[in-house]
């Protein structure tokens, strides 16, 4: 973690489920940053993005139920129930309020955190996030089917396959060694096939369009200019529906900005959180 000490733990949810989490970065007077993962990969995939952000901010990261080292996802998992898991983590750590960053599925979950517990979210940053889970670009529909095909791969190959296909062609062609390193990290704590299916279904069924005007936290929505899975119009529409939200496109990045442009994304997020 580039010099940032990491503390790892687990805690038990009210329904008996287990959440694995990590904290890192300096103790500071302001609210910590809660990082919420996308579909695929464990906390290990925050990598350089978390390391950069942890130089100035206290970071709380966790694995969704159904991924990483957390317990299995319960039946009927939704982005709203995943948001409640994140809030229970803040309770466990004694954190009254946090700045929240979520990307893709994690951005959908972060949206619900801001909706169900507005007093606990001081600032909200949503990356590569739609208001509705099925709001894919035309090209993204094909990419989505390609991702679904990864679920038929052997268990130790599924997440590496998904990560590879989420990364933009530009990034894969220009950063082959880094792509392989990311795929290795994705395979360190593989998610079960059932877990990936449940989380993917939660993302597909996500729809907050009727509620976005209720978000009160200052909000920044980010998109990558090479995001062929979601495109830039769905995040732009999300920002337009949230009162006072800012929208920005990061250059030379695909769908997962934290993997393709970790340092630039961390700098943009930190600047917003420090306003």
Image (tube, grey):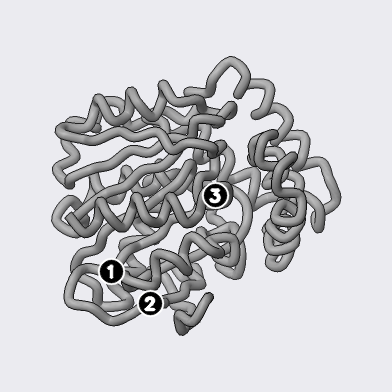
Residue 74, compared with residue 151, is above or below; it is: below
Which quadrant, please, contains the C terminus? bottom left
The percent coordinates of residue 146 (x first, y second) are 73, 30
Asked if one can make out residue 258 in the rendered structure from this viewpoint, the answer is: yes
Secondary structure under tag 2 reads: loop
Q: CA distance from mark 2 to mark 3?
A: 34 Å
Decide: few, some or many residues near mark 3? Use Cα within 10 Å; few <14, some 14-19, many ≥20.
few
The spot of residue 67 in percent (x, y) is: 60, 59
Number of on-image labels: 3
Q: Nearer the viewer, residue 119 or 235?
A: 235
Viewer-side label of 1, 2: 2
Label 3 to label 1: alpha-carbon separation: 31 Å
Compared to residue 113, the image places residue 225 above or below, namely: above
Residues at circles 1 and 2 in contact by the CB criterion of under 8 Å: yes
Residue 30 falls in image quadrant: bottom left
- N-terminal of the pair, mark 1 or mark 2, is 2
Q: From this viewpoint, which residue is outermost toward the right?
A: 154
Residue at image mark 1? 32
Please, what secondary structure does the residue beneath circle 1 have? loop
Which residue, given by chain and number where applicable, does mark 2 sit on?
A: 25
Res. 213 image quadrant: top left
Judge left or right: residue 93 versus residue 104.
left
């Amino acid at each position: 973690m580039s010099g940032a000490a990491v503390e790892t733990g687990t805690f038990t949810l009210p329904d008996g489920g287990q959440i694995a989490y990590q904290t890192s970065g300096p103790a500071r007077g302001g609210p910590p940053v809660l990082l919420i993962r996308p579909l695929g990969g464990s906390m290990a995939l925050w990598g350089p993005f978390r390391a950069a952000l942890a130089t100035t901010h206290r970071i709380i990261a966790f694995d969704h139920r159904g991924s990483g080292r957390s317990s299995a996802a319960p039946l009927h998992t939704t982005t709203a129930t995943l948001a409640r898991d994140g809030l229970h983590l803040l309770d466990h750590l004694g954190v009254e309020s946090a700045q929240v960053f979520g990307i893709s599925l994690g951005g959908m979950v972060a949206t619900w955190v801001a909706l169900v517990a507005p007093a606990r979210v001081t600032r909200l940053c949503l990356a590569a996030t739609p208001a509705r889970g099925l709001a894919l670009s035309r090209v993204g529909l094909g990419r989505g089917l390609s991702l679904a095909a990864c679920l038929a791969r052997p268990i130790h190959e599924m997440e590496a396959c998904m990560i590879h296909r989420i990364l933009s062609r530009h990034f894969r062609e220009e950063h082959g060694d880094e792509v392989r390193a990311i795929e290795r990290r994705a395979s360190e704590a593989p998610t079960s096939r059932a877990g990936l299916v449940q989380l993917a279904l939660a993302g597909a069924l996500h729809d907050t369009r009727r509620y976005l005007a209720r978000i009160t936290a200052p909000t920044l929505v980010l998109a990558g200019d090479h995001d062929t899975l979601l495109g830039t119009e769905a995040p732009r529409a999300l920002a337009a529906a949230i009162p006072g939200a800012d929208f920005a496109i990061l250059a030379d990045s695909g769908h997962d900005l934290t993997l393709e442009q970790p340092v630039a994304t961390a700098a943009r997020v930190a600047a917003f959180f420090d306003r």
